[in-house]
């Protein structure tokens, strides 16, 4: 065999061509981010709002992140399995978006110390687990003002999932908003023991309507309550999302949630290597909570009053839980001149004046 000998210059040139160009170093792989959702992904509700935030983050950080999500994951062993699978799949930042994911998140986080986790609505942290939540009760108070002015029967119905403090404070804030403009207003509550069960939610709504409620609201994930209100020709105030298309005549407004900016900021921190566990509780002034546009049936003076209250809340002049506060048995829970602290809010296990019944045992 004849071996061809190349000139030294040609050999050197060939060697250089074989080396990767320093000016074209391999691009850094996008950050992988996972999400766990408690209910099926639709176009409205709790999960829909979190997924909207995920998509807003993807758009803001195009090319820098890739995401994946798992929907309709029950709280419990299934959640732990799904969270672990996301970590094993290489996701470096994982958002678990339901209260009952708290302990499963912590358990998986301990097994994956180099992965960062963010848990929504919980109260336990770890070196690689942060928590985040929104002050939904601020929007609830404002929505209660609308309900208090629009009701004819002075009875509002509230379809609620589980009696955890987050839900109880929402009920109480709604009642306080109602009674701020209508001292005769009362709130009746029916519990579904589920975050997402359209059948139970519809049944609860129908029960409340039969008990005289002419304004409904809910702390559940589906559009069933708004649809029930539309069918029975009563009013509704939606939760999580603007659900006007499901109740164009019924929906007066909605307390809406917004996560895009938060998700973007936390992903940016992960990309920059500055992520640290935090405890974030954002309200109306932070853009976490807002009200959907008013139905034209809401009089202008009511809209103006609610908008003024919203501005006062943002300015720190109005608090949903400023004293005096009495429970529905007449016991003083907070004197005049004081405001409930975050710690007190997160332990709320009683109904305020205007809410009928007793809080069931917690979840």
Image (spheres, grey):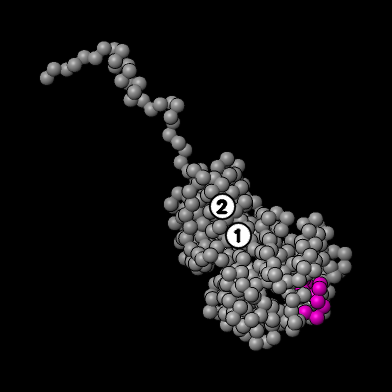
> Up-down: is 313 above or below 168?
above
Name the residue nearer the viewer: 138 or 83: 138
Name the residue nearer the viewer: 127 or 274: 274
Q: Is residue 319 visible?
A: no
Which quarter of the rendered picture does the N terminus lie within? top left
Residue topped by disc 2 = 56
Q: Could you say where residue 303 lies in the image, as x and y percent from the top left?
A: 76, 67
Q: At x 66% / y 54%, what residue is drawn?
A: 279
Q: Specify whether 180 is left or right of 188.
A: right
Packing grade of label 2 (10 A; few <14, some 14-19, many >=20) is some
Which quarter of the rendered picture does the C terminus lie within? bottom right
Tell us which disc is closer to us: 2 or 1: 2
Query: Magenta residues?
Result: 176-185
- Residue 353 part of the magenta segment: no
Q: Earlier in the sequence, mark 2 or mark 1?
A: 2
Q: Could you say where residue 278 lies in the image, as x and y percent from the top left?
A: 65, 51
Q: Quadrant location of residue 289?
A: bottom right
Q: At x 59% / y 44%, what residue is drawn?
A: 269
Q: Could you say where residue 69 lies in the image, as x and y percent from the top left?
A: 48, 57
Name the residue nearer the viewer: 299 or 135: 299
Q: Are marks 2 and 1 in contact (CB under 8 Å)?
A: no
Name the residue nearer the viewer: 357 or 283: 283
Q: Which mark is residue 120?
A: 1
Q: Is residue 206 visible?
A: yes
Helix, strand or loop at mark 2: helix
Helix, strand or loop at mark 1: strand
Q: At x 61% / y 69%, what residue is drawn?
A: 244
Magenta-drawn stretch, dominant element (helix, strand or loop): helix
In the rendered image, the residue lying farthest to the left is 1
Q: At x 80% / y 55%, what residue is drawn?
A: 315
């Amino acid at each position: 065999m004849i071996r061809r000998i190349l000139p030294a210059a040609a050999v050197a040139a060939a060697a250089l061509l074989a080396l990767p160009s320093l000016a074209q170093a391999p691009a850094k792989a996008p950050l992988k981010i996972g999400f766990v959702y408690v209910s099926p992904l639709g176009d409205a509700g709790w999960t829909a709002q979190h997924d909207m935030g995920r998509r807003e983050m993807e758009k803001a950080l195009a090319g820098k992140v890739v995401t994946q999500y798992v929907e309709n994951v029950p709280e419990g062993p299934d959640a732990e399995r799904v969270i672990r699978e996301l970590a094993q799949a290489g996701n470096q930042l994982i958002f678990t978006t339901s209260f009952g994911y708290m302990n499963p998140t912590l358990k998986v986080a301990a097994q994956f110390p180099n992965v960062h986790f963010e848990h929504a609505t919980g109260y336990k942290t770890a070196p690689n687990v942060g928590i985040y939540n929104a002050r939904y009760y601020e929007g609830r108070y404002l929505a209660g003002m609308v309900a208090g002015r629009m009701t004819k029967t002075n009875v509002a119905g509230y379809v609620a999932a589980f009696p955890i403090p987050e839900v109880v404070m929402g009920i109480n804030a709604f009642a306080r908003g109602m009674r701020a403009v209508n001292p005769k207003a009362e709130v009746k509550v029916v519990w579904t023991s589920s975050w997402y069960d359209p059948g139970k939610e519809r049944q609860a709504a129908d029960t409340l309507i039969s008990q005289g409620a002419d304004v409904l609201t809910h702390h559940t994930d589906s559009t069933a309550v708004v649809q029930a209100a539309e069918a029975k020709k009563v009013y509704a105030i939606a939760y999580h999302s603007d659900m006007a298309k499901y109740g164009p005549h019924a929906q007066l407004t909605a307390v809406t949630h917004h996560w895009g900016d938060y998700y973007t900021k936390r992903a940016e921190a992960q990309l920059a290597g500055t992520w640290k566990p935090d405890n974030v509780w954002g309200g109306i002034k932070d853009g976490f909570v807002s009200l959907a546009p008013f139905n034209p049936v809401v009089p202008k003076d009511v809209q103006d009053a609610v908008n003024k209250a919203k501005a006062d809340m943002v300015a720190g002049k109005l608090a949903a839980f400023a004293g005096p506060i009495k429970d529905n048995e007449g016991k003083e829970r907070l004197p005049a001149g004081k405001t409930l602290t975050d710690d007190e809010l997160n332990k709320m296990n009683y109904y305020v004046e205007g809410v009928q019944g007793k809080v069931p045992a917690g979840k």
